[in-house]
Image (cartoon, helix red, strand yellow):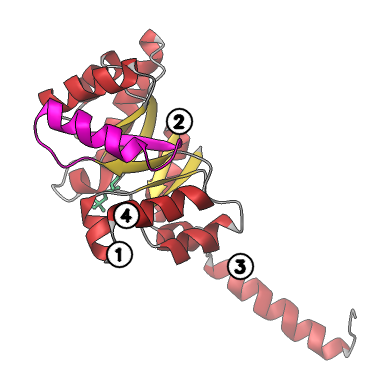
């Protein structure tokens, strides 16, 4: 499973990238707002750092506007994936942009039927939002499983990009189901390294080592 980082925080992206944890980046208007930076400037900095797909989201609500914004965002760097919402207009924009050879990430997906439409429209990525479904007492992970089954049934090449990830369990569950990519906030990716038994075991080893009076260097 590929790891995308769901942030426009360039320091956080850099830190994870140094460990080889970043296959791509996703941003959205809320994350750009949170960064407090200009969309083109911050996206350019991210694209210079990460060679993989960097999603930048359109904000127009009509297809023509999305296409125009998408083409403008594409000028930032070759590795931009234009993000459009899963509306009828978004699907139209997806079809036009993907026919022109651009990567398109169709976002705000909450049903298997929406994902089916996005694949038919040529999406490079479909972004089902797990956490926001869980927030409504639904099971976001069921949606990932349904989309996996449908795409595999028909050989759709659209990548399932598990989004709105809130916990480390979301990461392992998405990987077990076979999501192609998971995009997660930096703190979730870092938390994946944590286990209380690792900390406990390390404490015991260090205590025993200290009692030997030895040193390796
Ligand atoms: C994905 O592309 C979205 O930017 C993101 O995962 C949304 O996550 P949220 O539901 O935690 O805002």
**Disc 3: residue Cβ within 8 A of ligand 1's nearest atom:** no
Residue 193 found in image quarter: bottom right
Residue beneath disc 1: 35
Between discs 2 and 4, the one toward the N terminus: 4
How far apart marks 3 and 1 lie (CA) works out to: 34 Å
Q: Nearer the viewer, mark 1 or mark 4?
A: 1
Between discs 3 and 1, the one toward the N terminus: 1
**Disc 4: residue Cβ within 8 A of ligand 1's nearest atom:** yes
Between discs 1 and 2, the one toward the N terminus: 1
Between discs 3 and 4, the one toward the N terminus: 4
Residue at the (41%, 51%) spot, across then down:
44
In what element is the residue under mark 2?
loop
Asked if residue 66 lies in the magenta stretch, the reply is yes
How far apart marks 3 and 4 lie (CA) works out to: 22 Å
Asked if residue 69 lies in the magenta stretch, the reply is yes
Residue beneath disc 3: 198
Residue at the (11%, 23%) spot, across then down:
88
Residue beneath disc 2: 178
Q: Which residues are magenta?
A: 58-84
Between discs 1 and 4, the one toward the N terminus: 1
Instruction: Verify CB contact (< 8 Å) between mark 1 and mark 4.
Output: no
Residue beneath disc 4: 166
Residue at the (29%, 23%) spot, across then down:
97
């Amino acid at each position: 499973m590929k790891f995308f980082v769901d942030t426009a925080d360039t320091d956080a992206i850099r830190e994870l990238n140094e460990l080889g944890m970043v296959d791509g980046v996703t941003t959205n208007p809320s994350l750009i707002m949170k960064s407090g930076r200009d969309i083109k400037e911050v996206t350019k900095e991210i694209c210079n750092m990460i060679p993989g797909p960097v999603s930048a989201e359109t904000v127009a609500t009509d297809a023509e506007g999305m296409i125009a914004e998408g083409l403008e965002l594409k000028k930032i760097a070759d590795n931009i994936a234009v993000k459009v919402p899963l509306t009828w207009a978004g699907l139209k924009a997806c079809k036009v942009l993907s026919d022109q050879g651009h990567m398109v990430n169709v976002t705000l997906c909450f049903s298997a039927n929406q994902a089916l439409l996005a694949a038919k429209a040529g999406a490079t990525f479909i972004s089902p939002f797990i956490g926001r479904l869980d927030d409504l007492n639904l099971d976001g992970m069921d949606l990932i499983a349904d989309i996996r089954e449908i795409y595999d049934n028909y050989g759709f090449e659209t990548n399932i990009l598990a989004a709105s990830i809130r916990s480390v369990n979301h990461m392992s569950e998405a990987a077990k189901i076979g999501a192609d990519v998971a995009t997660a906030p930096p703190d979730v990716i870092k938390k994946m390294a944590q286990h209380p038994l690792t900390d406990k075991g390390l404490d015991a080893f260090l205590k025993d080592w200290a009692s030997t009076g030895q040193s390796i260097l």
